[in-house]
Amino acid sequence: MISNIAIVSHYSELGHIQDCLKRMLLKLRLENWHILLVTTFFNAESKDWCILEKIDFLLRANQGRDFGAFQAGLRHYQKLKLFVDCKSLILLNDSVYLRRDTHLTSWNNFLKGDSDSVIGITDSFQNGYHLQSYALNIPEIVFNSHCWLNFWKNLDITTSREIIIQDGEIGLSAMLLNSGFRIRALHSVLAARRLTFSTQFNDWLHEQLAYTHCHVVIEYFHSITCMSSCLLNPSHQLLFPLLFDGLPLVKRDLLESNSSRAPDPFLLAGSIDWFDNDELVTFLKPPIVQFKQPSFIQKILKSLYNRSIRLQRCRSSQGRSTATRMICNTKISD
């Protein structure tokens, strides 16, 4: 009998399982979660590791991003009738880093879940209120409902990334609310916003950071004071108060590229033992800097620039030759 099922979305062009993901999977297994790792490609080493650790894996077509993986995993286990005795279901993706100091976070509360509510780690008002889908805990009353089954049956995963986010992540929360189910974030965007100027958070910042870095972080929160909470991505722009509040998972894209220009969480590395440097080597995929292929227009402009340089050199060379001949002629006349 399987009481707890975890479906985890995975993607790697090389087919490897990152060390930090292995740690998260083993931690789940120790908590008696039956795991299905859904991926587009596994190398031989990854397959052997899953077999050794008794973790199921499923290969799928590379469509639909995380929601394509969740859909494939749910359909696979439904065919095997593994949800008959299941009491709890969690959906996770591999784009998050599980903090090493999980005992100081809400990780155990997430795994515990709620018997009548879908639980997320964070929520957002961007483009419509929703639970951010990198981590969801779904109770039995929801995953056995007709609306849940119909949602995944009818979800089109062949469309663009933007539509999948709208219909998948945002659409799932909308469907749950419209069907009368409760959804709840362990770390809501509004609570995190209130924390940013609280005495407790500011005292914590001064304990964790040197004065200069602490001042930079506080100035950042001053700069977004007038922004509506509906425009914020909490897992990026409010990460520091969320870490203070016990956020267990950190988004990979924030660590890699930080498009929101939020304070870098690695500033806390000296005071909080939340990450392992060796794990990050196989986890992060930082953007290529200064090695991008030039565009067609850039190639033309560079060609024209090089041509003008060559012409200038030719003219300069011709000018020097003429001047030399004139000097020589002058000496001969003399």
Image (spheres, grey):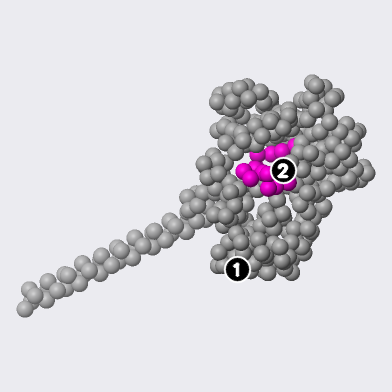
Residue lying farthest right? 180
Residue 310 location (% of width, % of height): 34, 60
Mark 1 closeness class: few <14, some 14–19, many ≥20 residues within 10 Å = few
Which residue appears at 36% of the width and 62% of the height? 309
User: In front here: 135 or 40?
Assistant: 135
Label 2 or label 1, whichever comes before in sequence order: 2
What amino acid type should be assigned to the residue bearing mark 1? His
Task: Tally the numbered discs.
Answer: 2
Residue 163 location (% of width, % of height): 76, 45
Which residue appears at 77% of the width and 33% of the height? 71
Secondary structure at numbered mark 2? helix
User: In front here: 15 or 282?
Assistant: 282
The quadrant of the image that shows the N terminus is: top right
Look at the image and give the residue range highlighted in magenta: 91-107
Mark 2 closeness class: few <14, some 14–19, many ≥20 residues within 10 Å = some
Quickly name the residue at label 2.
Answer: 107
Q: Is residue 94 magenta?
A: yes
Residue 78 in which image quadrant: top right
Residue 69 location (% of width, % of height): 72, 34
Residue 174 location (% of width, % of height): 86, 46
Secondary structure at numbered mark 1? helix
The reply to whether the C-beta atoms of the residues labelled 2 and 1 are less than 8 Å apart is no
User: In front here: 60 or 295?
Assistant: 60
Quickly name the residue at label 1.
Answer: 215
Residue 201 in which image quadrant: bottom right
